[in-house]
Every structure is written in structure tokens, then in C-alpha cells.
Amino acid sequence: MNGTFRVTLLTPIGSKSGTINFIDDNGVLSGSIHAMGSENPFRNGISNGNSFEFSGTLKIAFNRFDYTAKGSITGDTLSATAVTKFGIMQINGARI
């Protein structure tokens, strides 16, 4: 699970590029999302096999919104969804 992934976030305001960094310590997942000009650490991360989930707050300009994300990594491909108060965002990416 460890590594950095170049991702595309399909947000309500359009497609945004960024990276997600994962640090997996025996099922305890930490890391951050770097997108839209800011780095946003996540919390409550867990991994189980190739599946993961975590939550956090994304900061976009002067706005902040909470999310929960669930997904999986197959080979070098990441696929996830993030649930926010604005709807569901798809997250797709590849290990770099």
C-alpha cells in the first residue's frame, strides 16, 4: 500500500489533478492528498489487503469540506470514491 499515486479527482467543480501519498504501518494508514494547491493530511486510515479507507478535510481556496474515502489498489492502479456534503467524487490514479 505504501507509495505515491498521481490521481484525478472528479469533483463537483470539475476534474482536478493531484497526488495521494500512503504510509501503511501494518494496517494503520496515514498520508496526505496534495491537490488544488494545498496538502491535506488524512486521518482514521486503515488498510486491509488491497483495500483502504480514510477521512479528512480538503481545503480549496477559502473553503473546507470533510470527506470519507474508500477504495482499492490493484497492481499500480488506484480506484476510490470520496463522499462529501457536495456529493460523491471519483478518484482514479496510478503509482508514480
Image (tube, helix red, strand yellow):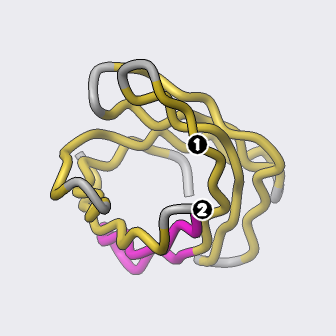
Q: Which residue is drawn at 48% across and 29% down?
A: 63
Dots 1, 2 in contact, CB < 8 A: yes
Whole-angstrom CA distance, mark 1 to mark 2, is: 7 Å
Measured as percent of width and height from the top left, residue 58 is found at: 52, 37
Q: Residue 75: which numbered mark, if any? A: none
Question: Mark 2 — residue?
Answer: 85
Where is 37 relative to 43, above or below? above
Question: Mark 1 — residue?
Answer: 65
**Prevalent SS, magenta region:** strand
Q: Is residue 50 left or right of 48 when viewed as pictured?
A: left
Helix, strand or loop under label 1: strand
Instruction: Specify the segment rendered in magenta.
Output: 71-84
Which quarter of the figure is the N terminus placed in? bottom right
Measured as percent of width and height from the top left, residue 52 is found at: 65, 68
Helix, strand or loop under label 2: loop
Work out whether mark 1 precedes mark 2 in sequence or the reverse, and give the earlier one.
1
Q: Which residue is drawn at 36% across and 21% down?
A: 61
Residue closest to the eye, 47 or 64 = 64
Which quarter of the figure is the C terminus placed in? top left
